[in-house]
Image: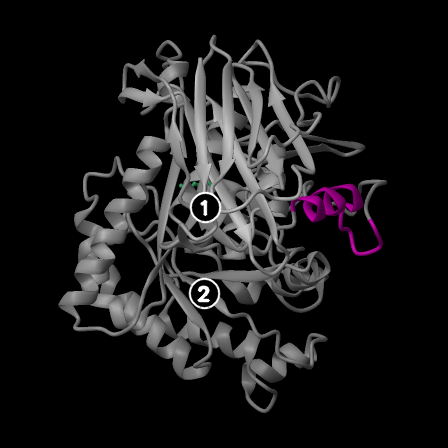
Amino acid sequence: AQASVALHTGRTIGEISPLIFGGFAEHMGRCIYEGIYDPESPLSDERGLRTDVMAALRETNYRIMRYPGGNFVSGYRWTDGIGPKADRPRRRALAWRSIETNQFGPHEFMDFARELGTEPMWAVNLGTGSIQEAADLVEYMNLPTGTLYSDLRAANGQQEPYGVKYWCLGNEMDGPWQIGQMDAATYAEKAVQASKLMRWMDPSIKTIACGSSATSMPGYPDWDLTVLNHAYDQIDYFSMHHYAANPYPTVSNTERLPLDTDSYLASSIHFAEHADTLAAAIRVAKAKNRSKRDVHLCWDEWNVWYRAKGGDGDWSEAPHILEEEYNLEDALVVATWLNTFLNKADVVKIACIAQIVNVIAPLMTRRDAMFRQTIFYPLTLFSNHAAGHALAALVRAPIHDTKRYGGVSQLDVSASFDEATGRGATFLVNRSQTEPLQVTVTWENGAPQAVTHAWQMSGPDPLAGNSFEAPDAVTAQAIAAPVLDGAHATLLLPPLSFTTLLS
Ligand code: AHR
């Protein structure tokens, strides 16, 4: 079959915020402990940071990092994580039935973020935590010395304020699993008061309110409308979470329905609808509030997650929970998700893959080794090459049938063009499990000098993945870049493939 993609550098969707290439590091499972931080590993430096993990995180080029939760944060006392390590308390972390040693805390996280060159995005505890504790944390992290908490920071070794700019007002506060769950109106008011106090401490910060924790929540999208209407002028971003699954929605941890890969590979229909609904809710709230300000979407938890659902840490340290193993079809879904971020670049301004190491993550570690999961590759290609403005691609491609979404384009596309460098990137996913696609890309307002690089991920088995034994079984391979014929480039997309072109 044949397809065409037409690009015009003047037909833009919006500016691509670099912060859509973000990550999320929660104190849960083996994300922090045994993932980022492992003093016992021969691969760690003198601070306990895993050097192999740091190198791979640098490859992905994460621009923002959400921390310290997730569900964990709703029971977290940030004062536990400061001061001499020997004096820090061991606590029961109720969210994941785990033991938290507090050996990694605010200072260790800031060292990690600085070393990575990533912007920190801090979540405050609005479950058991008070608005005063949230404001105190802003004082501790951001204010010059001279008062109690800023002086305490200096006494703990950091004289200069850290200047954390992005602050999440709690996490998934609509979920019955959340420590301190509340109804929408109660949350909205607590978020307003927390944001107000935090901004009185430091007016330069940006705050992010919780949206529904999933589109499957009974309160969606009423929760979102209530929070947005009430809090609009006190927030800068509105958070959305979603985890994709094959099939979707999952029924339970143990019960498995038969796989429906065609529908799964069309999940971006759902992602786009989710973003459109919340963008519309934002517009309504803006009008209701007679506001002149814009609020943007912060998709601060997104990934594939349906196999390793059990979150019971059995009261141990660094339990092996949520260690999802990814395959080729998951990588293709992740690529279409990143396409969605570009195609919604006007409204989605922050996004954080959940999470970065071991816990539903692109990297897996054991004490003496690490490997990159399949989803590492699309994430890293987009993060390093999508820049400037997202282009509205005109796509003609065969439509194929899916059980969940009906007729869906066989080809999923996004593209970017960076005026500053003159570089463009085109991202193409062939969703068919059986049909190759010959695609012609046309640059309508002038051909680039060349397609300089091309990478492709594909394979016959959608369920194939990587492991410690076969770390490179499914990767993105450099392929011969298609030669331009005037303003056209034609190339063959194998079934089940993700292709990146740089021009
Ligand atoms: O990322 C794993 C968990 O998923 C987070 O802690 C929570 O916010 C969500 O339910």
Which residue of the protein is positioned furthest toward the bottom in this rendering?
146
Which residue of the protein is positioned furthest toward the left in this rendering?
288
Secondary element type, mark 2:
strand
- The residue range painted magenta reads 45-60
Q: Is mark 2 within 8 Å of ligand 1?
A: no
Residue type at mark 2 is Trp
Q: Residue 453, can we see it?
A: yes
Secondary element type, mark 1:
loop
Closest to the camera, between mark 1 and mark 2, is 1
Quarter-wise, where is residue 450 in the image?
A: top right
Q: CA distance from mark 1 to mark 2?
A: 37 Å
In the rendered image, residue 53, in percent from the top left (x then y), is placed at 73, 42
Q: Quadrant of ligand 1?
A: top left
In this image, 235 relative to 43: left or right?
Answer: left
Q: Which mark is residue 51?
A: none
Residue beneath label 2, please?
167
What secondary structure is the stretch in magenta mostly built from?
helix
Residue 57 belongs to the span the image colors magenta: yes
Q: Quadrant of the N terminus?
A: top left
Quarter-wise, where is residue 187 in the image?
A: bottom left
Residue 411 belongs to the span the image colors magenta: no
Residue drawn at the location 52% of the way across and 56% of the way down: 19
In the rendered image, residue 62, in percent from the top left (x then y), is placed at 61, 51
- The crowd level at tag 2 (other Cα within 10 Å; few <14, some 14-19, many 20+) is many
Residue beneath label 1, please?
8
Quarter-wise, where is residue 47 in the image?
A: bottom right
- The crowd level at tag 1 (other Cα within 10 Å; few <14, some 14-19, many 20+) is some
Q: Quadrant of the C terminus?
A: top right
Q: Residue 22, can we see it?
A: no
In the rendered image, residue 63, in percent from the top left (x then y), is placed at 59, 56
**Of the pair 83 and 252, the residue shown nearer to us:** 252
Task: Judge whether 210 appears above or below 256 on screen.
Answer: below
